[in-house]
Amino acid sequence: MIYENYSFSTKSEVEKLLSHHDNDDIKKAIIGAINGIKDWEWLQNLCLNYIHNPDFWVAKTAITGISDIARIHRRLNIEKVRNSFNQVSNERLQPIIKSTLDDIKIFIG
């Protein structure tokens, strides 16, 4: 397995990758956006757009991305995030959501 560090500095790079509608590209776009883009609200909305994705790994990446945004930027619209998380019906994602909410408490309060 080869480790790749994804980091995108512009929203257009991310949007171009997302336009491929490929699950691997979506995961790369989310990770790379969080690693390079400074607009926490845009990042939050990006992640929330994918938490209901039918692909488990895309949804998981989006949910854990929220945790990374909290850690890096120390800002989120917590009410919006919780409301979105409450609508996730995939039981496999519930432990990941719980862990992310715990991280939000740690990094934001």
Image (cartoon, rainbow, N blue to C red):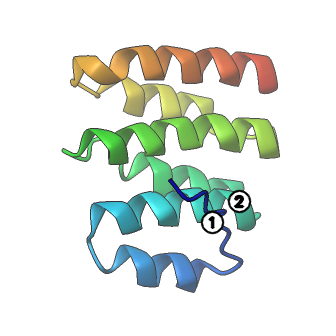
- Residue 106: name its quadrant: top right
What secondary structure is marked by label 1? loop
Residue depicted at x 48% and y 25%? 82
> Which label number is shown at residue 56?
none
**Residue type, numbered disc 1:** Tyr
Q: Is residue 92 left or right of residue 46?
A: left
The reply to whether dot 2 and dot 1 touch (C-beta < 8 Å) is yes
Q: Quadrant of residue 90?
A: top left
Is label 2 in a helix, a strand or a loop? helix
Neighbour tally class for label 1: few under 14, some 14-19, many 20 plus, Cα within 10 Å:
some
Q: Position of residue 79 (x, y in %)?
A: 55, 29
The disc placed on residue 35 is: 2
Q: Which mark is residue 6?
A: 1
Marker count (numbered): 2
Q: Nearer the viewer, residue 27 or 108?
A: 27
Residue at 48%, 58% (x, y): give it.
46
* Rendering coords of residue 65 (x, y %): 56, 43
Image location of residue 107, percent across then percent down: 79, 26
Q: Which quadrant would the C terminus be assigned to in this image? A: top right
| Residue 35 placement (x, y as % from top left) | 71, 59
Label 2 and label 1: CA atoms lie apart by 7 Å
Q: Nearer the viewer, residue 14 or 41?
A: 14
Residue in the image at 35% along x and 62% along y:
24
Q: Is residue 31 above or below residue 7?
A: above
Q: Would you say residue 14 is visible in this rendering?
A: yes
**Res 87 quadrant in image:** top left
